[in-house]
Image (tube, rainbow, N blue to C red):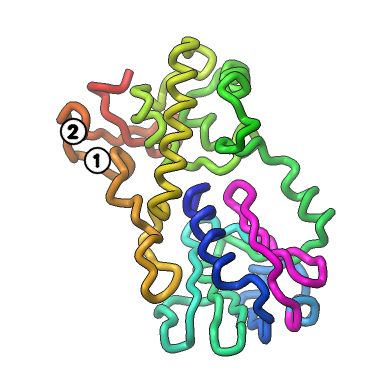
Amino acid sequence: MPELPEMENYKLLLNQRLVGHLITDVQVEREKSINVPVSQFRNEVIGTSIQRVERRAKHLLFHLSNARILLLHLMLGGIMFYGSKEDKPDRTVQVTMSFHDMNLYFIGLRLGYLHLYSPDEADRFLQKLGPEPTDRSFTAERFASLLHKQSRTLKATLPDQAVMAGIGNCYSDEICFEAGLLPSRKCDRLSVEESARLYDSMQHVLTEATRYGGYMDMPLYAGDELTGGYDSRCKVYDREGEPCVRCGHPIERRDVSSKKSFCCTHCQH
C-alpha cells in the first residue's frame, strides 16, 4: 500500500504536470470507486482545471477550479499512471481523467477510492487523522508524548493513522530497524533515549524515501526514473533471509500485532 513517501512523490510529480490543465473528460468504469452518481461526478469535474495537488497522510487532494476537491486513497494495490492511450499499462482502470490527449489513469481501485467533496466535507473526512510525522510542528517531544500514551507495540502504533498519519507496514519496519528497536517493543516502555532515537530515525527514513521516490515499482509516466527508487534501499522490508546490512545476520519475518513484520533479531533490541 502506498505510504507517505509514495504519495508525496506522486504529489510532487503531478503538480509539475497537471496544475492549470483543463479536465476535458472523465470516464468511470467502476461506480463504487466514487461517492456520487457518475453523471454528477462528470458534470462537476469536466471543464474544471486542477489548481494544486496536496497530500494529507496517504491521501491526495486534487483542488479543482470550481472549489471542489477530489480526494484519493489508493489503498492496497492502487496505482496511478499519467500518459497517452498508447502508453497506458495493460491494467484494469477504474477511473480515467483526461487532459486533451493525456490521461491520468487510476488503476487498482478495488479497495481505494476517488471521492468528490466540498472543502468542508474533505476537512471533516480527514479530521480523524493524527499529525503528519514530517511536519515541523511535530517535535520529538510531541512524538514521545504520543508514544508513551500507547501500551501497544511499535508495529501496531506507528501505522495507526489516528496516532500519526502516513506510515504503514513498510516504513514502520524501516524506522524500527534504523533505530535499532524491535517492532514488538511496547511504546510505553521505551526509554527517553530510545524515543528520541526512534524520532530521528523516522525523520531520516521518511525524508530519504521521499527523495528516492518511495518503493512503488511502477513508474508514474513513461520515462519516470524517480518513482520506486527507494525499493532497492529498503533494509528489512520484504528482505526475509537476506543478510542484515548492519550485522550480516539473516532478516526474519515475524507476525507482530497481527501484522507481517521484518527485522534483524540480532541488532534490533
Residue type at the position of mark 1: Glu
Mark 2 vs 1, N-terminal side: 1
Q: Position of residue 212 (x, y in %)?
A: 38, 52
Q: Which mark is residue 93?
A: none
Q: Mark 1 points at which residue?
A: 240
60 drawn magenta: yes
Q: Residue at 31%, 22% (x, y): give it.
A: 268
Q: Give the range drawn in magenta.
A: 46-71
Compared with 60, 36 (above or below) is: below
Q: Distance from label 2 to label 1 (Cα)? A: 7 Å
| Badge 2: residue crowd in 10 Å (few <14, some 14–19, many ≥20) | some
Q: Name the residue under label 2.
A: 250
Q: Do the residues labelled 2 and 1 touch (CB within 8 Å)?
A: yes
Q: Position of residue 66 (x, y in %)?
A: 82, 71
246 drawn magenta: no
- The reply to whether residue 233 is in sight is yes
Q: Residue at 50%, 68% (x, y): give it.
A: 80
**Magenta span: helix, strand or loop, mainly?**
strand
Tell whether 126 sits left or right of 202.
right
Query: Helix or strand or loop: what does disc 1 sit on?
Result: loop
Q: Nearer the viewer, residue 224 or 122?
A: 224
Query: Helix or strand or loop: what does disc 2 sit on?
Result: loop
Q: Which of 32 and 20 is in front in this view?
A: 20
Q: Which of 145 and 66 is in front in this view?
A: 66
| Badge 1: residue crowd in 10 Å (few <14, some 14–19, many ≥20) | some
Q: Residue at 32%, 36% (x, y): give it.
A: 262
Q: Where is residue 76 in the image (x, y as percent from the top left)?
A: 49, 56
Tell whether 141 sits left or right of 45.
left
Assign the C terminus to one quadrant of the image.
top left
